[in-house]
Image (spheres, rainbow, N blue to C red):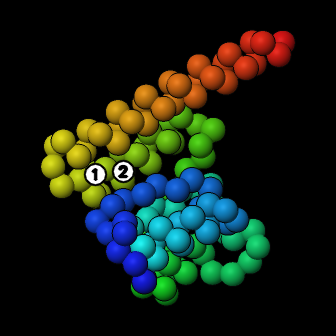
Amino acid sequence: MTGVRLADQVWIVTGAASGIGRAIARLFASEGARMVVADVTQQVIEGGMPTVDVIAAEGGKAIYLPTDVSQREQVDATVADTVSRTAASTASSTMPAFVMQDRCSRWTRAIGNAFSRSI
């Protein structure tokens, strides 16, 4: 770990087992964030150690939570698990679920509108 810009923050990065998600998780961890590696697998497509092991070797903190983002229930469970592991107060434990719900509803509206126009 080299920085502190994200110290005391917890970030969930989906697709963090490989590729861009992995790079983001490693970068945020290097800035002090506690990372949740959310992916359907821990296997690294490009090879090498799992992301949580790399982050730990680099001095950071990370956990893996199996998450298929195409399954709303799994996303909700990942957020709830993250909050229960990291929440320091009632206020901080309610915010992530609210943000996720708001963004999911906007995503559904956007995707729904795009699909309805293309059919």
| Residue 34, horizontal then vertical, whole percent | 38, 67
Q: Secondary structure at mark 1?
A: helix
- Badge 1 is on which residue? 84
Rendered-image quadrant of the N terminus: bottom left
Badge 2 vs badge 1, beta-carbon distance below 8 Å: yes
Name the side, left or right, on which 22 lies relative to 100: right
Rendered-image quadrant of the C terminus: top right
Q: Is residue 104 visible?
A: yes
| Residue 14, horizontal then vertical, whole percent | 57, 53
Name the side, left or right, on which 19 lies relative to 101: right
Task: Give the residue at x 63% y 81%.
Answer: 49
Q: Secondary structure at mark 2?
A: helix
Q: Please, what is the three-letter code of the amino acid marked with disc 1?
A: Ser
Q: Residue 53 has which mark?
A: none
**Number of numbered discs overlaid on the protein picture:** 2
Q: Residue 81 has which mark?
A: 2
Name the side, left or right, on which 68 lies relative to 59: right
In the rendered image, the vertical position of residue 78 relative to residue 70, given as above or below: below
Q: Is residue 17 visible?
A: no
Q: Please, what is the three-letter code of the amino acid marked with disc 2?
A: Asp
Distance from the alpha carbon under mark 2 to that under mark 1: 5 Å
Badge 2 density bin: few <14, some 14–19, many ≥20, Cα 10 Å: few
In the rendered image, the vertical position of residue 7 relative to residue 54, given as above or below: above
Badge 1 density bin: few <14, some 14–19, many ≥20, Cα 10 Å: few
| Residue 8, horizontal then vertical, whole percent | 28, 65
Task: Give the residue at x 61% y 67%.
Answer: 22
| Residue 62, horizontal then vertical, whole percent | 43, 70
Q: Which one is in front, 9 or 78?
A: 9
* Residue 36 in which image quadrant: bottom left
